[in-house]
Image: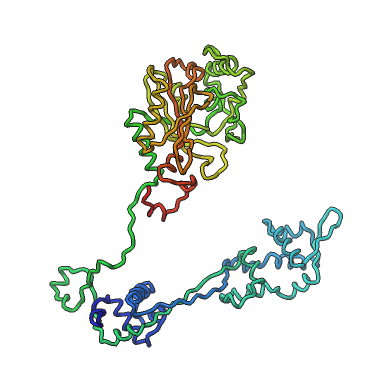
């Protein structure tokens, strides 16, 4: 490319900077260029310099300088904790009780100061009966009339920042870490330098004309278009990526799940996060000695700590009888003595199956198809596949013709519509369903459990007058997302990395 072609490719600001650098001897900092009144903003200088650099007309050199400065001037003016303590002890004659120091340095500052006094050997702690007394050492007495090395360094920093190379690392360590008085800063000095090609282009007699990017009627009618340069449109010019707004992937997956169920004729339901154990466990025929009721598995609350079950009237007595002897269900129950006190315990719901049974209690008539997509809480250790708070996909079908084959078909139909075909059904046990199944999907080289399903036992539904089969299931929502997008760590779903959310094309 010849000199003329290079000049023609330059924008108005690039030409302006090129001429300025040539006038300044071929090298200058952005600040020096701005001091000449050539540009108003540093970003304009560096933007033009970047383009000159790309076109090999200039280079940008960076020199990094590290230095220390005062991070909190107000705290620095108050003085170090040990300085205030030494002065307080000195004012008391060289010794002071711990209580006296607490009065002189309230809000817990005295406790911090004592640690520094001992660490720096400024005071000893002696006992006088039940009292502890701080007594200045020789070093502490010396500090009454002389500033300590830390203080001298703070005084210097109060005047101006100090280069990192001029400070002893040992003396600065405590001021940064323990006091929070000092910050480490980095200053980057940039220098723009013309290349040999840049000098040649700059001395070629560049004509500097005002550049316009838009042709207007005023520009044409006034005749000003003759005196300006129309900026050329460059299809290869770099432009920042623009990302359209979009919903979080879990929100979109949730909408997909809801649409799938509503398309299948289901109605959405939900209920409270906080429930009595009575609804979450007892009504669902979970025995009161079941491991799920232990503190290590369930979040019990202190406020409220329990619910009054009297509003449920005879249902409480019915559930009690079912647990103890089966009641009128034909079951033998779990035996033992059912505890009303345990049933009154307030807890964060451990599954959304509580939504299902509460819905049945209000709408026992068949047919019915309902689902929920909502939060549940369990005392799980956080790892790649477990969270203590997660979302469950819940559903029930109340129908006279419902059976186990229908349940399996519904489960497989749901996951087929979500795009999964490697599905495995295996027998399982749940206290509230019989028969029961667990669903597994092949993921990341192994079978992953996604949830369970079954037909509600008579002990669960008969107290509400339901005589026909009730199909029920609960699936993991986050694990479904992991399968869908090949995510190996469930925690990644809730890390709000905006850059990843913008650029990720998987979801």
Residue sitting at x 57%, y 72%: 68
Residue at 58% across, 25% down: 343
**Residue 192 picture quarter:** bottom left
Q: Position of residue 168 (x, y in %)?
A: 65, 75
Q: Nearer the viewer, residue 230 or 409?
A: 409
Give the side of residue 406 with respect to residue 3, left or right.
right
Determine whether 479 is above or below 123 in the image. Answer: above
Residue 141 versus residue 467 in the image, above or below:
below
Q: Residue furthest right?
A: 129
* Residue 382 shown left or right of residue 143 in the figure: left
Q: Position of residue 394 (x, y in %)?
A: 44, 31
Report the number of numbered marks: 0
In this view, 257 is above or below 340: below
Of all residues, the one furthest to the left in this rendering is: 221
Say which quarter of the image contains residue 367.
top left
**Residue 144 seen in the current view:** yes
At x 43% / y 23%, what residue is drawn?
471
Where residue 115 appears, x then y in whole percent? 73, 61
Q: Position of residue 13 (x, y in %)?
A: 30, 76
Q: Is residue 40 visible?
A: no
Q: Is residue 327 left or right of residue 190?
A: right
Q: Outermost residue, front direction?
A: 445
Question: Could you tell me which residue is drawn at 53 percent across and 70 percent down?
Answer: 185
* Colouring convention used in this rendered image of the protein: rainbow
Which quarter of the image is occupied by the N terminus? bottom left
Asked if residue 119 lies left or right of residue 311, the reply is: right
């Amino acid at each position: 490319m010849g000199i003329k072609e290079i000049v023609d490719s330059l924008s108005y600001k690039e030409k302006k900077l090129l001429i300025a650098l040539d006038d300044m001897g071929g090298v200058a900092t952005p600040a020096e260029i701005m001091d000449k009144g050539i540009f108003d903003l540093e970003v304009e200088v560096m933007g033009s310099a970047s383009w000159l650099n790309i076109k090999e007309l200039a280079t940008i050199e960076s020199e990094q300088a590290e230095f220390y400065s005062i991070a909190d001037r107000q705290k620095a003016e108050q003085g170090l904790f040990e300085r205030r303590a030494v002065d307080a002890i000195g004012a008391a004659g060289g010794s002071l009780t711990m209580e006296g120091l607490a009065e002189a340095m309230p809000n817990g500052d005295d406790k911090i100061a004592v640690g520094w006094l001992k660490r720096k050997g400024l005071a000893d702690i002696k006992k006088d009966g039940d009292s502890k007394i701080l007594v200045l050492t020789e070093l502490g007495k010396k500090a009454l009339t002389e500033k300590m090395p830390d203080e001298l360094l703070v005084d210097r920093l109060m005047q101006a920042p100090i280069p990192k190379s001029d400070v002893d690392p040992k003396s600065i360590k405590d001021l940064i870490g323990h006091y929070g008085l000092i910050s480490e800063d980095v200053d980057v000095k940039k220098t723009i330098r013309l290349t040999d090609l840049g000098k040649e282009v700059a001395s070629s007699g560049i004509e500097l004309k005002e550049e316009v990017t838009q042709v207007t009627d005023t520009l044409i009618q006034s005749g000003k278009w003759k005196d300006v340069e129309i900026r050329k449109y460059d299809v290869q010019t770099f432009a920042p990526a623009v990302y359209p707004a979009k919903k979080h992937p879990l929100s979109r997956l949730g909408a997909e799940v809801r649409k799938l169920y509503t398309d299948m004729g289901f109605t959405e339901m939900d209920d409270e996060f906080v429930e009595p154990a009575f609804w979450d466990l007892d009504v669902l025929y979970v025995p009161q000695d079941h491991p799920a009721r232990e503190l290590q598995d369930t979040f019990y609350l202190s406020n409220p700590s329990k619910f009054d079950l009297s509003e449920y009237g005879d249902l409480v007595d019915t559930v009690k009888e079912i647990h103890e002897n089966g009641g009128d269900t034909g079951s033998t129950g779990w035996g033992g003595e059912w505890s009303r006190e345990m049933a009154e315990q307030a807890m964060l719901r451990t599954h959304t199956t509580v939504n299902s049974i509460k819905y049945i209690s209000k709408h026992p008539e068949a047919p019915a198809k309902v689902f929920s997509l909502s939060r549940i809480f369990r005392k799980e250790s956080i790892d790649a596949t477990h969270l203590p708070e997660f979302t469950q996909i819940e559903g029930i079908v109340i129908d006279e013709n419902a059976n186990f084959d229908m349940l399996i078909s519904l489960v497989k139909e749901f996951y087929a519509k979500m795009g999964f075909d490697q599905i495995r059904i295996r027998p399982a046990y749940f206290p509230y369903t019989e028969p029961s199944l667990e669903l597994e999907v092949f993921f990341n080289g192994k079978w992953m459990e996604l949830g369970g399903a079954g037909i509600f036992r008579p002990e669960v539904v008969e107290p509400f007058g339901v005589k026909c089969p009730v199909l029920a299931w609960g699936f993991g929502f986050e694990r479904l997302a992991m399968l869908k997008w090949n995510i190996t760590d469930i925690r990644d779903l809730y890390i709000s990395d905006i850059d990843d959310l913008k650029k990720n094309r998987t979801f």
